[in-house]
């Protein structure tokens, strides 16, 4: 592999900030809802913590479609960390400026270290376990990769197993720990994204039952949430990644999409080499993502998330020369549906369209 998993995720997380330097006047905005279905209503475990809904935070001054952040309290002192929900990993890494395990009486040092690299930004630190609270619900003995950094960065992965762990395959995934602690009883959670209203995440019994089709994740994917999807001529399992500010894929796939939507000659590279394209704001391409029987068009707001110096709009679709994964459906996708529900037992998703 040319690039470590953590580096790939770091690029997905940092991509929004890249665009601000070279091409912007980026507009913010978005819309909402949530739900769940009967496929998982076999026999659900005890309700445990009882479930809860928490308001998600939005990135400040994002030059691209903003990402959501989950507020949580960690350790005996209740240190607050606002973490991105990363689709490509299964555990939590949090900077010491947001949470310092040495100051928490409930933290346990595993005496294990982690480090990711080479090929890009390298996070190095120690693995601790501690208690995390989300909307007042407690998950104990959560593995946390703690590393020194001053910007308060943090993320927790929503991959359901440890195949994509930064901290090692012996560490229990964030979601499994949430389930064991009773936060995900039933084993479901949902995300409702809104640019202008309130974005929320619901856990366990707070996720309402819904009817409709569930979409099974790719059984071959290493814990990723993937939807069998089609954009123009490109069909594959695509990764749901709330930490991505765009629809992100390989340069080859994204160039094919740009050609299909008539913007293939309007491409440019930002300073970090990502492939992007512009279009006249009064003639936006009609980008539609097909998921099962659903046609999900990207909203007008999503399509007009940013402008270049000439006043042209910038596509919310980005190509990466080093991408090793299928296309990721990030904030632009979440902003174009009402809600998405995840069932970690059946490894399937339910979508409520706008």
Image (tube, rainbow, N blue to C red):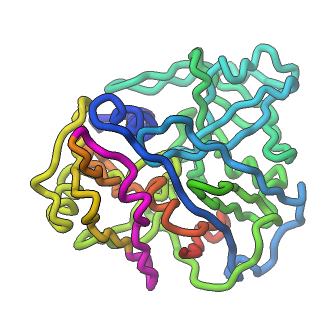
Q: Quadrant of the C terminus?
A: bottom right
Instruction: Decide if residue 8 is on the left or right side of residue 154.
Output: left
- Across the whole image, how many numbered discs are drawn on residues? 0
Name the quadrant containing residue 321: top left
Query: At x 64% / y 59%, what residue is drawn?
Result: 191
- Residue 330 drawn at (x, y percent): 45, 54
Does residue 111 sit above or below 342 in this rendering? above
Q: Is residue 291 magenta?
A: yes
Q: Residue at x 64, y 46 (%)?
A: 173
Q: Quadrant of the N terminus?
A: top left
Asked where in the image residue 75 lies, by quadrant, the reply is top right
Residue 105 located left or right of residue 67: right
140 above or below 215?
above
Above or below: residue 93 compared with residue 175: above
Q: Which residues are magenta?
A: 290-309
As rendered, which of 106 and 109 lies closer to the eye? Answer: 106
């Amino acid at each position: 592999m040319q690039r470590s998993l953590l580096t790939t995720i770091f690029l997905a997380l940092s991509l929004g900030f890249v665009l601000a330097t070279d091409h912007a006047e980026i507009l913010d905005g978005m819309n909402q809802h949530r739900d769940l279905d009967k496929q998982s209503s076999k026999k659900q475990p005890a309700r445990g913590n009882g479930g809860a809904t928490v308001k998600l935070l939005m990135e400040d001054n994002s030059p691209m479609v903003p990402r959501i952040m989950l507020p949580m309290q960690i350790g005996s002192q209740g240190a607050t960390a606002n973490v991105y929900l990363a689709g490509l990993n299964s555990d939590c890494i949090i900077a010491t400026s947001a949470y310092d395990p040495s100051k928490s009486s409930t933290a346990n040092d595993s005496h294990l270290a982690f480090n990711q690299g080479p090929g890009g930004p390298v996070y190095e630190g120690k693995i601790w376990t501690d208690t995390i609270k989300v909307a007042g619900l407690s998950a104990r003995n959560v593995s946390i990769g703690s590393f020194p950094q001053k910007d308060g960065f943090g993320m927790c992965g929503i991959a359901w197993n440890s195949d994509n762990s930064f901290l090692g395959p012996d560490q229990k995934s964030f979601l499994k720990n949430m389930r064991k602690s009773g936060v995900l009883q039933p084993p479901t959670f949902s995300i409702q994204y809104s640019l202008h209203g309130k974005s929320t995440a619901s856990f366990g019994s707070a996720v309402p039952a819904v009817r409709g089709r569930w979409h099974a994740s790719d059984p071959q994917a290493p814990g990723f949430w993937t939807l069998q999807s089609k954009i123009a001529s490109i069909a594959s399992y695509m990764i749901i990644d709330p930490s991505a500010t765009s629809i992100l894929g390989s340069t080859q796939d994204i160039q094919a999409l740009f050609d299909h939507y008539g913007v293939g000659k309007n491409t440019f590279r930002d300073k970090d080499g990502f492939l992007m394209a512009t279009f006249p704001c009064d003639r936006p391409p009609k980008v539609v993502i097909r998921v099962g029987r659903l046609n999900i068009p990207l909203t007008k707001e999503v399509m007009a998330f940013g402008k270049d110096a000439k006043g042209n709009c910038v596509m919310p679709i980005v190509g990466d020369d080093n991408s090793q994964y299928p296309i990721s459906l990030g904030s632009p996708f979440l902003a174009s549906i009402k809600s998405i529900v995840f069932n970690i037992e059946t490894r399937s998703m339910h979508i409520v369209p706008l």
